[in-house]
């Protein structure tokens, strides 16, 4: 957080004796503003809206795992390895269009761009249900990745324009918890929808794509009305409340700056080693994350369960992971620490994969391997949530932060590209190749996170030393030149 941060607590704005941020650009209208109450309003208006979109996003990308065990590969005459190629193409499309999507968001508005992306991938997801050959499957998976690529980094950037630095991590983690919730929700939906096999002469797996895709389109159209823009323009806040939000943000970060898009700010992100470490932090988590979400139904089925049982057995690990992700985010937020928490949960996932690898006969002892999937899910999802919130907290400069968020997801999803090729049918039921890579990546994640943790603490020490030697240094918001420095400013302290 900023060393010269101006605190804005529950108070009477504009009343005699009230301590408010003074800034010539912010007009504060007299009245009573309770900060905690206002934050609850923001949470209720912003978080459910973007969380629903992300739940749909994860549901539409991972339901292919549920469709697979309902006969997708058989009906499309695909081998197991060709199915893996389709999964890979999704992440290629995702990686290629990540950064362009965030640049478009910066140049348009969230109210237009986020629902438009959702409509686009909803149409693509629905088309998956009417695909009749593997070529069509490949094309649709690529375009699904392309259209979904802008949502997560876009929302992370969007939330950073509403909340103070110390408030972002919990909200981003809460938003990301919809990924594991989508896994649980997807298992229930797939189990129910699969019973529609034969309706309209369609297989059950086709109805999974069609109904979930149509649900996405319907909600996306409504999203044009329930997604908001930025604090200075929304109509559901009073002029007084908008001024208060602008004041508290201006005292904390760059969220209120009228920053124009410049390619030099994109280059600044590319030159920052910490941005690449944020990317490496997610890269080493994305392989375990997506291999678990894309292959868990198959992994469980190959323990000896039926397809219907496998759909239902995916629910408990995801449900527990959702709860733990929220709990871990709250604890991390209270202690203002990231690195130690990520290390702890990644270590938990390491234990889960060791159990999976150690069980030489999953069909004879399915309970042992099933317990391993619990530890893997409980470890992976909280770690990913914290890793993804790190640049939103620490990168200053709006364009630089939007670029850093997109770079993190792009670099990260290169791990997912590799992961989609690891769980080959020939390695069933132990999946030694896939589990070993996931284990290795988690160990690398612990190393990368601790390197980044050390780097952030070192730069903080250097800034503190500089300030001790130059106490006359301006505050972060005192001039245009100071603002241009962004997170390079001596008074911008990184959260490690």
Image (cartoon, rainbow, N blue to C red):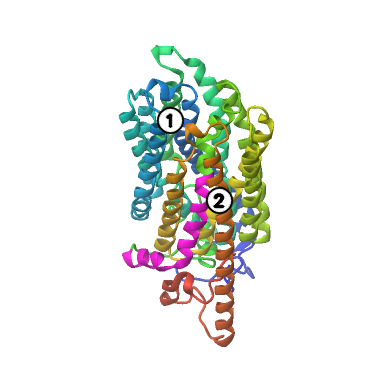
Who's the residue at 34% across and 34% down the image?
138
| Residue 309 occupies quadrant | top right
* Quadrant that contains the C terminus: bottom right
Local SS, label 2:
helix
* Quadrant that contains the N terminus: bottom right
Q: Where is residue 48 drawn, in percent x and y? A: 54, 41
Magenta-drawn segment: 262-288
**Disc 1/disc 2 C-alpha distance (Å):** 24 Å
The answer to whether residue 98 is visible is yes
The answer to whether residue 154 is visible is no
Does label 1 or label 2 sit earlier along the sequence? 1
Whether label 1 touches label 2, CB < 8 Å: no
Question: Does the magenta portion include 450?
Answer: no
| Rendered position, 13 above or below 331 | below
Number of residues whose C-alpha sits closer than 10 Å to that of mark 1, classed few (under 14), some (14–19) or many (20 or more): some
Question: Does the magenta portion include 276?
Answer: yes
Identify the residue position indicated by label 1 in the image. Answer: 80
Closest to the observer, 4 or 432: 432
Q: Where is residue 131 drawn, in percent x and y? A: 34, 25
Q: Is residue 76 left or right of residue 248?
A: left
| Secondary structure mainly formed by the magenta segment | helix
| Rendered position, 237 above or below 55 | below
Identify the residue position indicated by label 2 in the image. Answer: 440
Local SS, label 1:
helix
The number of discs equals 2
């Amino acid at each position: 957080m900023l060393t010269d941060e101006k605190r804005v607590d529950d108070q009477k704005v504009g009343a005699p004796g009230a301590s408010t941020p003074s800034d010539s650009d912010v007009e504060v209208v007299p009245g009573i503003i309770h900060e905690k109450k206002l934050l609850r309003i923001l949470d209720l208006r912003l978080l459910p809206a973007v969380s629903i979109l992300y739940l749909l996003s994860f549901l539409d990308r991972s339901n292919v795992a549920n469709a697979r065990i309902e006969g997708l590969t058989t009906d499309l005459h695909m081998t197991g390895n060709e199915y893996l190629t389709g999964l890979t193409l999704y992440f290629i499309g995702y990686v290629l269009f990540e950064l362009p999507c965030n640049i478009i968001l910066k140049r348009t508005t969230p109210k237009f761009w986020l629902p438009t992306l959702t409509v686009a991938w909803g149409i693509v997801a629905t088309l998956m249900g009417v695909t009749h050959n593997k070529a069509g499957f490949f094309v649709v998976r690529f375009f699904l990745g392309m259209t979904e690529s802008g949502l997560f980094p876009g929302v992370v950037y969007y939330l950073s324009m509403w909340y103070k630095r110390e408030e972002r991590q919990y909200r981003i983690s809460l938003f990301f918890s919809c990924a594991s919730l989508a896994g649980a929700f997807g298992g229930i939906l797939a189990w129910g929808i699969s019973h529609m096999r034969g309706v309209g002469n369609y297989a059950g797996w086709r109805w999974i794509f069609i109904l979930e895709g149509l649900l996405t389109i319907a909600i996306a159209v409504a999203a044009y009305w329930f997604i908001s823009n930025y604090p200075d323009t929304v109509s559901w806040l009073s002029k007084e409340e908008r001024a208060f939000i602008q004041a508290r943000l201006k005292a904390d970060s760059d969220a209120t700056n009228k920053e124009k898009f410049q390619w030099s700010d994109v280059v600044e992100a590319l030159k920052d080693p910490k941005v690449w470490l944020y990317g490496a932090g997610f890269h080493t988590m994305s392989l375990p994350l997506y291999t678990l979400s894309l292959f868990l139904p198959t992994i469980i089925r190959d323990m000896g369960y039926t397809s219907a049982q496998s759909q239902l057995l995916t629910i408990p690990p995801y449900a527990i992971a959702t709860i733990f992700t929220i709990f871990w985010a709250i604890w991390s937020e209270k202690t203002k620490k990231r690195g130690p928490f990520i290390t702890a949960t990644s270590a938990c996932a390491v234990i889960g994969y060791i159990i999976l690898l150690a069980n030489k006969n999953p069909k004879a002892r399915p309970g042992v391997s099933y317990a391993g999937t619990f530890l893997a899910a409980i470890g992976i999802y909280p770690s990913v949530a914290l890793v993804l919130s790190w640049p939103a907290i620490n990168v200053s400069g709006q364009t630089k932060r939007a670029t850093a968020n997109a770079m993190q997801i792009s670099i990260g999803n290169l791990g997912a590209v590799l992961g989609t090729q690891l769980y080959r049918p020939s390695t069933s039921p132990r999946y030694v190749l896939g589990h070993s890579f996931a284990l290795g990546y988690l160990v690398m994640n612990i190393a990368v996170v601790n390197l980044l943790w050390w780097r952030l603490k070192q730069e903080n020490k250097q800034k503190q030393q500089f300030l001790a030697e130059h106490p006359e240094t301006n505050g972060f918001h005192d001039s245009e030149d100071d603002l241009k420095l962004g997170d390079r400013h001596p008074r911008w302290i990184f959260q490690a």
